[in-house]
Amino acid sequence: MNKDTLKEFTQKIFDDMAGAMSAGLCYIGIKMGLFKIMAYKGPLTQIQITNDSKLQPRYVEEWLKAMVCSGYLHYDPLACTYCLPDEHAYLLASEGTDHFAGGMFYMVPSSLSVAPAVAKAFKTGGGVSFQDYPEELVDAIDLINRGNYEQRFASYWLKFIPGIIEKLEKGACVLDVGCGVGRVPLTLARAFPNSQFMGIDSHSHSIHQAIESCKQQGLTSRVEFSEKPLNQLDANGKFDLITVCDCLHDFTDPVNMLHEMKKCLKPDGVLFIIEPKVADNLEDNCNSIATMLYGFSIFHCMTQSLAEGGPGLGTCMGPMKTEKLVRDAGYSHFEKLNIKSKVNLFYLAKL
């Protein structure tokens, strides 16, 4: 046994445990607004932070100390002050932007809450249905994606689909499959006032949120949300654009779903797919992002598909599997789009 290797791996275990605890602590910082309170204010005393947050002093004290040890906050021992560096605030106190990282921390308690059930599924098969997760998981998924969808979808990503912006400006029909709380249809509806939009999702709580948001934004005349399955929409040849955002790998019957989408497209319509950014070969995924995504897969994406009798493709299925699904569904054209992103891959398919 190599003692140096043993020592290094022992340290890695401690580092990983520290990372796990830090993720939970960051969840608290995001949920309770502590990062926002400290953002861009320089050094603050514990009393200042407690007073501004109106939270319990003992909890705030312990959280501040933990965040210093984890490297998220800086501490001045002479002045006894805590500081959230501006560069950290840029990622942690920026909800609604395309650089907000807080949603990832929201995934931790929701997804790990089902860890015992997932562990059982390793032996018995099946998995954990999406309906059995805490409702906060919906908030987590929305927080992860909201900034990107609102800041990049209409203004940047759609530019890579030839002719689609012109169609949307004139008036087009768009369907978002697996719409969640409706962020994509609502964002696009605000950007393209001459077009009609629809979002479908099987999760009742998400659709309820989407409908409420639609009412609040005054978009009910142009945006519709439904729990109806795709094959019950009576929408053959209706849509110029169908979007599938970060959920193709979740489907219980992905090829059939893609085939049903194909029926709903106009002859010159396009299918726009967003999936997590991973490589096809495992050896090319040995990095922190892929590690995180495999964790999301086991504790959410893969298990909820298997729970419903699906294939459990998982978060990290990669470009080759994505293309095979699309080709198997009968699309004649498939391409990977050259859109820059640290965490997403983008695909276009045509009839």
Image (spheres, grey):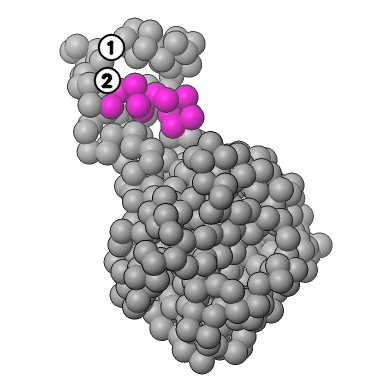
Identify residue type, mark 2: Tyr
According to the picture, the residue beneath numbered tag 2 turns out to be 82
Extent of the magenta region: 29-39
Q: Is residue 38 magenta?
A: yes
**Secondary structure of the residue carrying numbered label 2:** strand
Looking at this view, name the residue that lies furthest to the bottom.
Answer: 332
Instruction: Judge whether 226 appears above or below 143 on screen.
Output: below
| Relative horizontal placement of residue 83, taking residue 282 as reference (left or right) | left
Q: Can residue 91 be seen by looking at this rendering?
A: yes
Instruction: Judge whether 82 appears above or below 339 on screen.
Output: above
Q: Is residue 154 magenta?
A: no
| Relative horizontal placement of residue 14, taking residue 47 as reference (left or right) | right
State the residue in front, 24 or 342. Answer: 342
| Relative horizontal placement of residue 147, taking residue 111 as reference (left or right) | left
**Residue 279 figure quarter:** bottom left
**Secondary structure of the residue carrying numbered label 1:** strand
Q: Are marks 1 and 2 in contact (CB under 8 Å)?
A: yes
Q: Position of residue 71 (x, y in %)?
A: 30, 35
Q: Position of residue 154 (x, y in %)?
A: 36, 59
Q: Position of residue 107 (x, y in %)?
A: 53, 45
State the residue in front, 250 or 5. Answer: 250
Residue 340: mark in rendering:
none
According to the picture, the residue beneath numbered tag 1 turns out to be 45
State the residue in front, 332 or 163. Answer: 163
Structural crowding at the residue carrying mark 1, measured as other residues with C-alpha within 10 Å and reported as few (<14), some (14–19) or many (≥20)? some
Label 1 vs 2, first from the N-terminus: 1
Q: Can residue 8 be seen by looking at this rendering?
A: no
Looking at this view, name the residue that lies furthest to the right.
Answer: 124
Structural crowding at the residue carrying mark 2, measured as other residues with C-alpha within 10 Å and reported as few (<14), some (14–19) or many (≥20)? many
Q: Main secondary structure of the magenta part?
A: helix
- Which residue is rendered at x = 52% and y = 46% of the image? 219
